Image (spheres, helix red, strand yellow):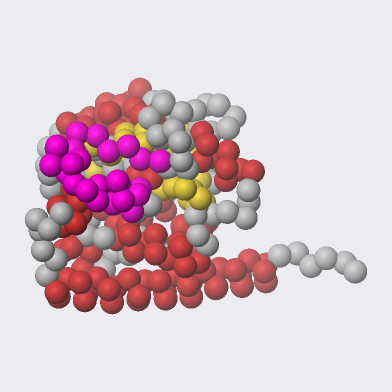
Amino acid sequence: MPSNAEVSVVIPCFNAAASLARAINSCLDQREVAQVILVDDGSDDASLDVARTIAFTDPRVKVMGTVANGGAARARNLGALHATHPLLAFLDADDEYLPGGLARAVSTLRTTPEHHVVRLNVTFKGYPPDILAFRGFAHHVEIMNNMITSSLVIRRTTFLALGGFPEDDVYRQYGGEDGTFQSAIMVLFGCIRLTGTRNVCNHYHPNSHVARYFRRMMGELDSPPEAVQQLGDAVHSFVARARSAWEEHVKGTENSAPATRS
């Protein structure tokens, strides 16, 4: 393992056998990756077989399973609890890192200890012509770039101090836990967004939360008023919890710091 390998990548998986090997191998191709934690969230396809086959050949891959499907946020949080390296990255099972994709993010966090979070630069692949031709596509790509989980690289201590991704039932129904987590990040720290070279690829799937987001922005899907209200309340609640948790973390860190002699 290279000496600069300090990233644990968490991959939640639910029935993603067709793309899972691509996702895991894209992690193993990154020199900075020390650990890949695959959390199978109750799949009933061959996902576990795919993951275990790769784990058999590479000790960096750890395979975990849940008793029943609990959603991506819970799977990610479970994986993060078992991570053993200072930086955390999250990759969806149908996405992939591009060659050298994590290098700049790791270098940035290594050399700027005051920063907590880096967002990778995402390329969106396989999207149908009507979405690509949508006048607001480029604008909404920028929004998604700062929200999709596959672009996130964060210090493990920061992630755990914030309590991980919100697991409220409203997110199981409507999605959006990744955007809510980003809201807390922006309120508390801000984050660095990489530009230029693309670092990670989001592949199109018609039922993915990214694809549905674009469809909503195009006016093809409606957001029920109750969903808007419930998600808005959930965001405010999570940001408040995250702020309180971070303040407690900082206070605890300060109290445990060794006293200096005058």
Q: Is residue 180 left or right of residue 154?
A: left
Q: Position of residue 37 (x, y in %)?
A: 36, 41
Can you name the residue that lies furthest to the top here? 57
Relative to 187, does residue 60 appear above or below in the rendering?
above
Q: Position of residue 3 (x, y in %)?
A: 59, 29
Residue at screen point 79% across, 67% down: 259
In depth, the one of 47 and 52 nearer the eye is: 47
Residue at screen point 55% across, 68% down: 249
Can you name the residue that lies furthest to the front here? 135
Relative to 211, does residue 63 appear above or below in the rendering?
above
Range of magenta residues: 121-145
In depth, the one of 82 and 105 nearer the eye is: 105
Q: Is residue 203 left or right of residue 128?
A: right
Residue at screen point 45% across, 61% down: 185
State the image quarter where residue 240 is shown.
bottom left
Residue 5 among those drawn in magenta = no
Q: Position of residue 245 (x, y in %)?
A: 48, 71
Residue at screen point 24% across, 71% down: 231
Q: In which quadrant will I find the C terminus?
A: bottom right
State the image quarter where residue 90 is shown.
top left
Q: Is residue 18 left or right of residue 119?
A: left
Q: Is residue 219 left or right of residue 249?
A: left
In depth, the one of 35 and 103 nearer the eye is: 103
Numbered disc total: 0
Residue 200 visible in the shown view: yes
Residue 137 among those drawn in magenta = yes
Residue 205 visible in the shown view: no
Q: Position of residue 99 (x, y in %)?
A: 41, 26
